[in-house]
Image (cartoon, grey):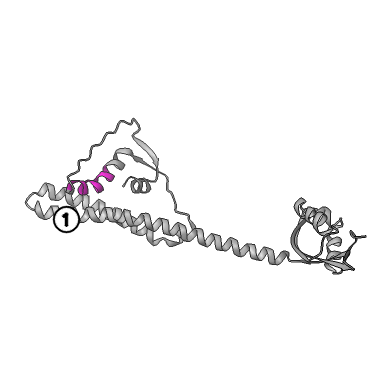
Amino acid sequence: DHKRVEFETKSIQAYKKIYNDDFLSCMGEDDRNIIQNQILNKSFNKQMNLELLLRNNNKANWYYLSAIPVIEKNELKKVVFSVSDFTEIKEYNQALINAMNETKNANLAKRNFLSSMSHEIRTPITTIIGLTELSTIEINNPEKIKENLLNINQASNHLLSLVNDILEFSKIESGKIEITKAPFLVDDLITSTISIIKPQANLKGISILIFNHTTIKRIIGDFKKLKQILI
C-alpha cells in the first residue's frame, strides 16, 4: 500500500501524547494538501522537508518534518516521516527578528528626527546672525536695538529647546517624543513664530503679511511643537 505511513522517531509519539489527535488533522490546509497530494502519492520519489505549525487544544508547536520515500523495484512502498520539534528555536529566531526590526525603526526615527532638526536649527541661528548684523548697523537707534535684542532672545530660547530635543536620544530611539498639552493664546504662537522668521525675511526683502480671521483665542496643545511645525 503506497499510502502506508511509518514514523521512526519518538517525537511523533510525544506529539500524540500532547495533542491526543490525528497528526494530519492538526495541520494547516496547505500543509495537509502537500502531504496528501504530493508526499502520499505514487509518484513521490525524493525526500521533502517541511516546516509545520500544528495546532490543537489551544496549543501550537513548530515541527520540522522530513518525508523520505522507500522505493523497492521502482515502486513506492512506504513513506517514512522524521519529525522534530523546533518550537523554541523558531520562537528564538522570531524574537531576534522582532528585536532587529525595533532597532531598525528606532534608527529610522532618529535619522528622520535629526534630518528635520538640521533645518530647524538653521532658522534661529540665521535669525540671531541677521539681527546681530542689523544691530551693528542701527547702533544709534535704541528702540530698534531693543527690538532686535528681544527677538534674539526669543530665537536663542527656541534654539535651546531644539538642542535639548536632540540631546534626548532615548526618546528619539524609542520613538516616544512627548507631546505636552497646555493652554496658550493663538496670538502668542503667531507672534513668537513671526519673531523668528521675520529677520530672515527682511534680509531677503520679503514681506510677511498676517491674516488672522479665527475667532478662537485660546487653544490647548504643545506650544513648542506647533511653533517648530510653523517654522
- 97 on left or right of 10: left
Q: Work out whether residue 171 can be spotted.
A: no
Foreground residue, 36 or 62? Answer: 36
Work out which residue is located at the far front of the displayed protein and give it: 74
Q: Position of residue 129 (x, y in %)?
A: 20, 56
Picture quadrant where residue 66 is located: bottom right
Residue stretch rendered in magenta on the structure: 191-202
Residue where numbered disc 1 is placed: 132
| Magenta highlight: main SS | helix
Q: Quadrant of the N terminus?
A: bottom right
Which residue corresponds to the image point at 86% horizontal and 62% vertical from the top-left?
17
Foreground residue, 47 or 105? Answer: 47
Q: Position of residue 177 (x, y in %)?
A: 44, 53
Work out which residue is located at the far left of the displayed protein and give it: 140
- 88 on left or right of 230: right
Q: Where is residue 86 in the image (x, y as percent from the top left)?
A: 73, 66
- Asked whether 193 falls inside the magenta stretch, the response is yes
Q: Which amino acid does label 1 sit on?
A: Thr
Q: Where is residue 223 in the image (x, y as percent from the top left)?
A: 36, 46
Which residue corresponds to the image point at 16% horizontal and 55% vertical from the top-left?
132
